[in-house]
Amino acid sequence: MLYWLLYPLHDRLPIFNVFRYITFRSAYAMVTALLISFVLGPWLIQTLRRMQGKVAVREDTPESHQKKVGTPSMGGILILVSSVIPTLLWANLTSRQVQLALLATVWMAAIGFLDDYLKIVKKSRHGLIGRYKMLGQFGLGLLIGATLYFFPEQPEIATRTSVPFLKNLNLLELGLLYIPFVMAVIAGSSNAVNLADGLDGLAIGLCSLAFLAFAALAYVSGNFKFAEYLNVPFIRGSGELTVFCMSMVGAALGFLWYNTHPAEMFMGDTGSLALGGALGAVAVLVKKEFLLVLVGGVLVAEALSVMIQVGSYRWLGKRVFRMAPLHHHFELLGWAETKIVVRFWIVAALLVMLSLSTIKLQ
C-alpha cells in the first residue's frame, strides 16, 4: 500500500525512491510487525483470558505441563495481524507470489481459529474433526498448485522444483504430479509446525529462523544477477516475498516476547497452522520445496517422531520414544524446558546455515 502511494512520488521527492528497494521495505516491514506485536500483545492477552477462562492443557503432555493451566491460547491472532498488516503496507501487492502467501496465511489461520474456538470456547474435546482439518490443508494446496500449474507466470519452470546439492539436475520436472506435490508440501509443513508447538517459545523460534532463511532465498531468486551467479532459477517477482518473510520474522519475534518461558499466551492452532501453511507456500513459490526439509529439519524431526511412535506402537506394540513429539521425549528424560527449546533453536540455526550454503554448491 505504501509502495503504491509513495513510490510514484519519487520523481518529485527523491527521498521516496527508497521504496523501490526490497531490502528497505523488508526491514521496515519487520519493524512494523514488531511494533504491532508490542502494542497489541498486552491487550490481546487480557482479552483472551477474559474470554477463555481457565484453559486446560493438552491431555497428551507430561505431568509437568499442569502448571501451564490458565495460560490463554489462540495467540496466533497476534501473529496473523502483525504479519499481514506490514505485508499490506510495505509489499508490492500486485505480486501474485505475495497474494498467494497471504492467502495461505489467512486460510490456514481460519482453519486453526475454528479448531481453537471449538476446543477452548465451546469446550469441544477434539475441536475440528481431523478429516475436515486435512481437507482444508489439502484444499489450500490444491488451489495454489492448480494456480501455478494452469496459470503460470513463467511456463518454462512452472512445474519444476529445485534439487539441493545437484549442480546438473538443478530443476526436476514433475508435470501433472506438481499439484499433488504442492498439496503434500503445504499439508506437511502446517502439520509439522503444529506438532512442534508444545513448549514455550519452541515452534515460534524455529519458524522465525526458517522464515529468515526463506527471506534470503526469495531475495536471491528474485534478483536476476544473483540467481544467475548462484545457479538458482530466476523467479520474476519472488523478491517481494522477502517483504512477506521479514514481516513473518518480525511477527514471530514479537510473539516470542510473550511466548518465552514462562509463556503469557500460546499460539494455538490459529498460529501454528498459519505459520506452517505460510512456510510451505513460500517454499513452493520460490521452488525450494526439497530444501524446506533441511531448513525446517527440527520441524521434520518432530513430525517424524510422531509417525514413528504411532507406527511402532500399532505394528510392534512398542514405543520408540517415551512420549511424542520429540520434545516431550527429552522432557521425560529430565531436560529442563528452556534447555530443550534453546538446544533445538541451535540445531535449527545450524541447519539454516547449511541450507543457505547449498546454494553455492549448485
Image (cartoon, helix red, strand yellow):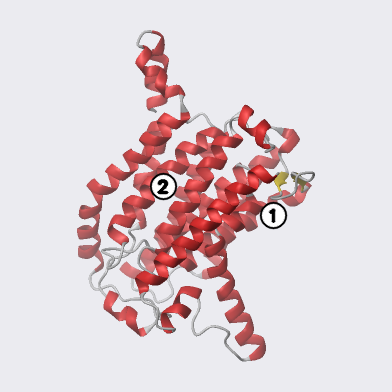
Q: Secondary structure at mark 1?
A: helix
**Which residue appears at 70% of the width and 46% of the height?**
161
**Which residue appears at 36% of the width and 56% of the height?**
76
Name the residue tied to disc 1: 180
Q: Disc 1 residue type?
A: Pro
User: How many dots with numbers?
Assistant: 2
Q: Quadrant of the C terminus?
A: top right
Name the residue tied to disc 2: 249
Q: Disc 2 residue type?
A: Val
Q: Nearer the viewer, mark 1 or mark 2?
A: 2
Q: Is residue 216 left or right of residue 117?
A: right
Task: Determine which quarter of the picture holds residue 152.
Answer: top right
x%, y% of residue 329?
47, 80
Mark 1 or 2, nearer chain start: 1
Comparing 147 with 28, the one in front is 28
Instruction: Decide: is 139 above or below 314.
Output: above
**Disc 1 and disc 2: Cα gap in Å?**
28 Å
Q: Is residue 18 visible?
A: yes
Task: Determine which quarter of the picture holds residue 14.
Answer: top left
x%, y% of residue 139?
59, 54
Comparing 334 with 156, the one in front is 334
Task: Determine which quarter of the picture holds residue 147.
Answer: top right
Q: Secondary structure at mark 2?
A: helix
Comparing 54 with 329, the one in front is 329
**Which residue appears at 26% of the width and 67% of the height?**
52
Instruction: Decide: is 107 above or below 266.
Output: above
x%, y% of residue 196?
47, 67
x%, y% of residue 26?
42, 35
